[in-house]
Amino acid sequence: MKENEAYERLIANGVRPSAQRLAIMEYLLTHHTHPTVEEVYRGLNTKIPTLSRTTVYNTLRILSEHHAAQMLTIDDHHICYDSDTEPHVHFFCKHCGKVLDLMEAEAPVVDVKNIGNNIVDEVHLYYKGTCAECAKRQEKVNEVN
Amino acid sequence: MKENEAYERLIANGVRPSAQRLAIMEYLLTHHTHPTVEEVYRGLNTKIPTLSRTTVYNTLRILSEHHAAQMLTIDDHHICYDSDTEPHVHFFCKHCGKVLDLMEAEAPVVDVKNIGNNIVDEVHLYYKGTCAECAKRQEKVNEVN
DNA sequence: ATGGGTGCAAAGGATTTGCAACATT
DNA sequence: AATGTTGCAAATCCTTTGCACCCAT
């Protein structure tokens, strides 16, 4: 990771850089796994034993409100976060629950500022289905039968 | 509404047509307001006083699993349902919480079957921002100041 | 001294589950 | 009878809130 990238991201988006916020921002910047609140909490708990879930909740909400990160509401039981704030497509596997990034080459580019008189400031593109791995596993099961 | 549209929709998607399921399916087909579980429950409670929330939860989940309706997870506190299962863009107003349909003319058409080896069977396009009404209201406030 | 941030515990809210009664075949 | 569906109550889980303490871009 670039030196101070977390710090710069917070400042650029008008978020005061406390130690906890820096740690959470850095966690998102170095883990492109679309972590949930719980995953961020557990991932940082060893480094910062005093960290509370409340702070993780608060911070992730603040980060997404300030567009320093994206909240992905791709599934009702899987709210997660992504430090990549550029619109890109997310794929959600209904079988294993994994969230993948799909590259621009594989997805339409949407760049809208407003539609009618509605002002658009976030674009979310979610595809859902069966990921390559789960599809392969199911094929095997079918072969056996 | 067409005669028996709810019935046909259930049968076509392999859902057994109980009285409750028919009523919920019909409610979705006649209310294009993207209702939540609670709104469906309240909307039907007068007609079917014995209806329980549990059944509304179960039924809406079954309908979306069978692609007889879509579950929209556009916002963490606003999970709602839409009987239109064709991919179309939804606009969510962060101020008033309203969910609007955007017509095809205003939005990209996405028709994907799979990407890489991932099998896509649902496409969700969500735009978020400020709706025309809320934007207008904010303008007025700004003029006064 | 002040405003903001943190974290504990408790509250709140939404959704699911266990299970007995009921309906439909 | 057998199978699937419903609905009540309770349990669970996730998230927010109240509040006291702490800290310092």
Image (spheres, coloured by chain):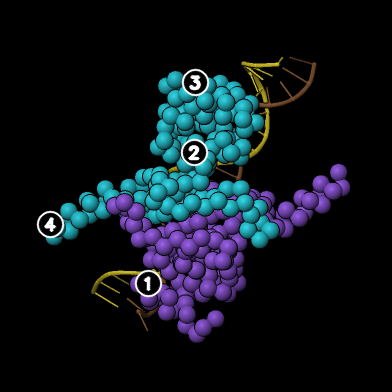
Chain colours: A purple, B cyan, C yellow, D brown
Residue at 20 percent across and 56 percent down: it is B139
Chain that bears disc 2: B
Mark 4 vs 3: CB contact within 8 A: no
Q: Which amino acid is tagged 4? A: Val
Residue topped by disc 3: B3
Residue A13, which numbered label?
1
Query: Mark 2 or 4 closer to N-term?
Result: 2
Residue topped by disc 2: B84
Q: In whole angstroms, how far apart are the C-alphas of marks 4 and 3?
A: 52 Å
Q: Nearer the viewer, residue B39 or C6?
A: B39
Q: Nearer the viewer, residue A77 or B126?
A: B126
Residue topped by disc 4: B144
Q: In whole angstroms, how far apart are the C-alphas of marks 4 and 1?
A: 28 Å
Q: Which amino acid is tagged 2? A: Asp
Estimate the x, y position of residue A105 in percent, counting from the top left: 56, 66
Res. A19 visible in picture:
no
Chain that bears disc 4: B
Quarter of the image with the C terminus of chain A is top right
Q: In whole angstroms, how far apart are the C-alphas of marks 3 and 2?
A: 17 Å
Q: Secondary structure at mark 2?
A: loop
Q: Which numbered mark, 2 or 4, is in the foreground of this view?
A: 2
